[in-house]
Amino acid sequence: MTNYAIQKLNLLGTAMNKLILILILFSTVSIGKIPLEDFLKGSDFKVVSISPDGKKLAGIMESSPGTDKIAVLDLQKMKGISSLEFGENRKIDGLSWVNNDMIAMNISKTEGFLDRKGKWEALYLMKANGKGKGYPIRQRGKTSKSVGRAGSNKTKQGYAQLVSGLPNEPEMILARVAHGSFYLARINIKSGMEFPLSRPADKRLANVWVNNNYIPVVAVSRWDPVSKSSNFYYKKPDASSWNKLNFIDDEEKSISYAGSSKDPNIVYLMSNHETSTQSLYRFNLSTGESKKIYTNEISDLGNTIYNLDRQAIGFGLMPDYPQVIWVDKKDPITQIYKGLQQSFPNQIINIYNATEDKKSMIFFVSSDTNPGEIYNLNLTDNKIKKLVATRGWVNPNEMAKMKPITITARDGLKMQGYLTLPRGKEDAKGLPMIVHPHGGPYGPRDFWGFNRDVQILANEGYAVLQLNFRGSGGYGREFQQIGYRQWGRKMQDDLTDATHWAIKQGIADKNKICIFGGSYGGYATLQGLVKEPDLYQCGLGYVGVYDMFKFQTCGDVASNHYGQKFLDKILGDDKDYVTEISPALNANKIKGKVFLVHGEDDVRVPMCQYNSMVKGLKAAGIPFQSMTRDEGHGYHNPKNVRDYYTAALKFFADSLKK
């Protein structure tokens, strides 16, 4: 480590330790129950970005429940300069400074998740000073004159998703455009003209990645069921032609770009074509040679950590707690990041962006108890300024801690998970417990971090058990594959084994356990009541799948060829098996209390699932509670969310009182 880096690290550590001391001194710890409303409020700021000159901040915040607005602030004074919103249920994402005066963003209508009401609407530009209304540069289904814009050019019709601004081209943005197929293009913010970037001539092209200088260097195609392969393309930054490699010979093997290095001809790739988990490779764009440099036997790799030149310096992963693997230990930002890790122990750190002169940067800090805080770090004098807490009314000292656990299944499989105990009851025994299986199930997983559902339940005095059962994502291709055709069998047994583990450890009172989950978690909830009728006193199924025959005919998964192939892979066509694993067809085995919550506009798990489960419960004479609302795959309307959580907490309390 250089003297310069050591000096910066020492100064940074001193400044941040002082900040932490101040935060501790002024924090208060309450021992009372936190009102439910505190958990249900939206974020003050979701994302904050600093302008190239470092004078302004742009942030996305909720103007009202379900509706975003963009706000621009003077960084020095932390006072508002301008703001803009786009109407009810309009959400903003992809915020990026184009130059010091202009901000680009994506606008979409989002009333819920996986419903029929949401849609992308526009790639929008806004003046930071608020003069004029701004204008869309691409817009769905319309060709209209721009608003507040010089000239008579028209907004172009068609889909374009913002990727980023282009620092060296202050009148350009980079976007992912759709005209028959997807491609990357530079778009001039004044004329609206687009300039497609180089891409391979492949009709099955799935993605193209640019290096830190925004030059395309890597691309991949979709899986071809005929040739049973996926093509990987690469080229040197200064080359015009693409080279092709064909080494993905399995539909569930993948390769993706992970970042540039200081050598323009060397990039990082993540792939599981040789290993079960995603391994890290150093790839030579000149020779096409690759070298595997890191594999974690338990967990896939996750996010890339960049320096201020957008070069990869490290990679995150989370086998249990968050970890970082460094590939450039000498970079100054590596040293800064390590200093932040020491000064913000047990926190996740994300660098958002930095000024053009690299003298100031924005970073985000969060943890299992901290929903998020945004800071500004002056890299000249190492002064840190707390800008905003995303949920300032949440006191991290009042939140429950999430602890990683390892569970051994009955067949010897090791599984990772998380246990959260109520604050103040970390050493208590025989607690009432909620088993909380995640959705998916293939791809998603539970992570260490702030989880609203978990905190709400812990606040009510429940231990909360989360398990990354077989089939979960994030733990490698093979761990996911052993969950195929195990719905209701080994995947369910994993949750049962984890529940018995908690009882054996003395954590849970065996007579006070409920199970609750959404989507696949809703399935696992009702199947848990069916398969283990004496283990769970109650179950809350949230937008869950309950009839596996209808799963193969009803909903957006079953509506296309790829979805049908997926369903055949994970379920098969054995009718006896499908009957066995359908809670709706086995409701007569249920002893525990039941609460069903569903969205009437859900396209992923439509009302056919809810109706089938209700029919089965009624036929078996099983009493149940239910709630349905005009929502998609999960509740978003603030009143519906409040009603749902209020009813859920009463359901658990009534079911577990003895």
Image (tube, rainbow, N blue to C red):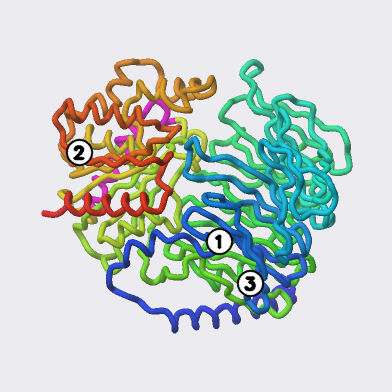
Using the rendered view, name the quadrant where residue 272 is placed. top right
The three-letter code of the residue at mark 3 reads Gly
State the residue in front, 355 or 189.
189
The three-letter code of the residue at mark 2 reads Phe
Q: Is residue 653 left or right of residue 405?
A: left
Q: Which residue is mark 1?
A: 61
The three-letter code of the residue at mark 1 reads Met
Q: At which x and y percent is residue 470?
A: 40, 37
State the residue in front, 24 or 52.
52
State the residue in front, 352 or 293.
352
Q: Is residue 428 above or below residue 141?
A: below
Q: CA distance from mark 1 to mark 3?
A: 13 Å
In the rendered structure, which segment of residues is drawn in magenta?
482-505
| Element type where label 1 sits in the image | strand
Mark number, residue 624: 2
Q: CA distance from mark 3 to mark 2?
A: 51 Å
Residue 405 visible at all? no
